[in-house]
Image: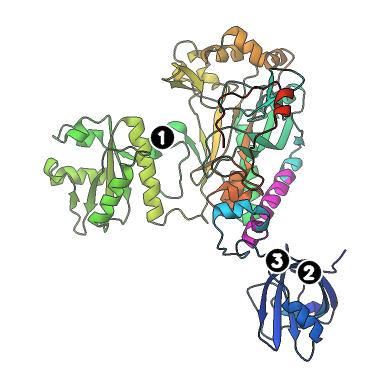
Amino acid sequence: MLRSHTCGELRLDNVGEEVILTGWVQRLRDKGGMLWVDMRDRYGITQLTYEEGITPQNLIDQARTLGREYVIRVVGKVVERYSKNDKIPTGAIEIVVHKLEVLNPAKLPPFLIEDETDGGDDLRMKYRYLDLRRTPVRRNLELRHRMMRETRNYLDQHYFIEVETPVLIKSTPEGARDFVVPSRMNPGEFYALPQSPQTFKQLLMVSGFDRYYQIVKCFRDEDLRADRQPEFTQIDCEMSFVKQEDVLNMFEGFISYLFEKEKGIKLGKLPRMTYADAMKYYGSDKPDTRFDMRFVELNHLVKNKGFKVFDDAELVVGINAKGAAYYTRKQLDELTDFVKRPQIGATGLVYARVNEDGSIKSSVDKFYSPDDLQHWGSAFHAERGDLILILAGNKDKTRKALNELRLEMGERLGLRDKNVYSPLWVVDFPLLEWDEDSNRWHAMHHPFTSPKPEDIELIDDRPGDIRANAYDMVINGVEVGGGSIRIHDRRLQEQMFTLLGFSHAEAEAQFGFLMNAFEYGAPPHGGIAFGFDRLCTLFGGSESIRDYIAFPKNNSGRDVMIDAPSPISDTQLNELHIRMKNIPHQ
């Protein structure tokens, strides 16, 4: 090795030792008679010192030529630091340099490589290899590494076997858009990149591998947001001879193990909430339960009082923002503007304050008596100083809008602390959802999800009432994992495809291999997949999964560092039998 120690390991115990360090120049401070260089590697920072009268002048002159990010190697002696720095682990020592070697000079970086940088997102993504030198980014990837290691540790302890499944597979019409790959040897035919190893892990269950897992890359060609990338990583798991309770217990244990290992937090038993209750009380199938503020429905209290907005509404529903009665008219107007934004879609906001004397003052006082308003207060369990916020309209849209308002109030009132964790299971999802545009049923999870056994009899007459044998793990309003007990019977799987609008020929062409496998002794099985990038983001207290991916894409799905995607040559296109038509020039 070119070094004897790293820049993060030397302590007072090493005083007097001759050491060799390698790394990058973080910064240089020249005070005339004294010169200090902060030297950085992946492990930390060590201060180098040069002093006139002690350090040879040629070494001092050489050190003064160093620039930021020069790659250097130094030989020197560890001494106790006179002015200690308690902000870094090596802050009690420094190196008196005897020899300096420049291994590679460097251009001035386009942004500061510091914890707090002056580089914007686009610039840092273009020079991601420099951004990765910054301590916060490095720590994110170290967290990802530890999470991956502990994931494997837990699953190995529970007899799961890691099996790699194919990356070049068959395109299917369900789910998000596939990324497709043309086949040179099979003109006019295409592979797809997997959105999930779903069918392969089910086939592994048929094969007798009763506990499978894979930390696997998946691909979806969809519009991007902070929590989405065109390629992402899943912890993909499947088990045989299990019921829903077995899967929930196994992976409740898994998430508890991760929290204890990485955060030192003991979770305890995870609560469970039905999909119906999640939508009724939170307006979302991934409720943030770090704070209360549950929905209260008011139809029975507010209808037929002459207020047309409430009288005509399918649903009148509200929340109690505890202690927020102090909100000014300006702040309430801001909330009204917030809920009227197109992406939220409410038409307006009604509010009521509970005053210090217990009286309630609302924005619709002329339609409701003081007694009416007291009934509102009772419904919300409102106390002095509380603020009641009410929306009205179409049932589904209003619940969705109130969910956004609830989250906004939680943020404003400091109730969404990223250091507090509130995990739960959401269960009993609908198996199917009706799509008006295509005029057919779609699988809410995927077409291999089994109905609840007690609901199978509804499959012919009331398919919309069937509950799925499915479950999601939600933490702080983020779905971090989801899965189901699978169909393992060919006849039931065929019925499911028929419900989803597949003809017999289409089902056979797309999934005949899986249904055929079911005829050779398929065990009952089920599983779950966790969004690994999301889990890392949650544990790291960030908003975007891009912070935990070494080389992420931007919001347009581009890698601006390597400039991908990019055109390919006519020769390659011809080999792939692809003709380009009406492609706009970049």
Image location (x, y in percent) of residue 318: 30, 42
Image location (x, y in percent) of residue 271: 51, 42
Q: Which residue is mark 2?
A: 72
Q: Amino acid at mark 1?
A: Met
Along the line of sight, the residue nearer the viewer: 214 or 376: 214
Name the element at disc 1: helix
Name the element at disc 3: loop
Res 412 quadrant in image: bottom left
- Distance from Cα at disc 3 to Cα at disc 1: 53 Å
Q: Choose the circle earlier in sequence order: 3 or 1.
A: 3
Question: CB atoms at circles 2 and 3 under 8 Å apart?
Answer: no
- In the image, residue 243 above or below residue 458: below
Magenta segment main secondary structure: helix
Name the element at disc 2: strand
Q: Amino acid at mark 3?
A: Glu
- Distance from Cα at disc 2 to Cα at disc 1: 59 Å
- In the image, residue 242 above or below residue 113: above
Q: Amino acid at mark 2?
A: Ile
* Eye-nearest disc, 2 or 1: 2
* Eye-nearest disc, 3 or 1: 3
Q: Choose the circle earlier in sequence order: 2 or 1.
A: 2
Residue 426 horizontal side relative to residue 412, left or right = right
Q: Which residue is mark 1?
A: 279
* Residue 34 magenta: no
Q: Which residue is mark 3?
A: 69
Q: Which residues are magenta?
A: 131-153
Question: CB atoms at circles 3 and 1 under 8 Å apart?
Answer: no
Q: Is residue 267 visible?
A: no
Q: Which mark is residue 537?
A: none
Residue 286 horizontal side relative to residue 553, left or right = left
Residue positioned 38% across, 43% down in the render: 404
* Residue 147 magenta: yes
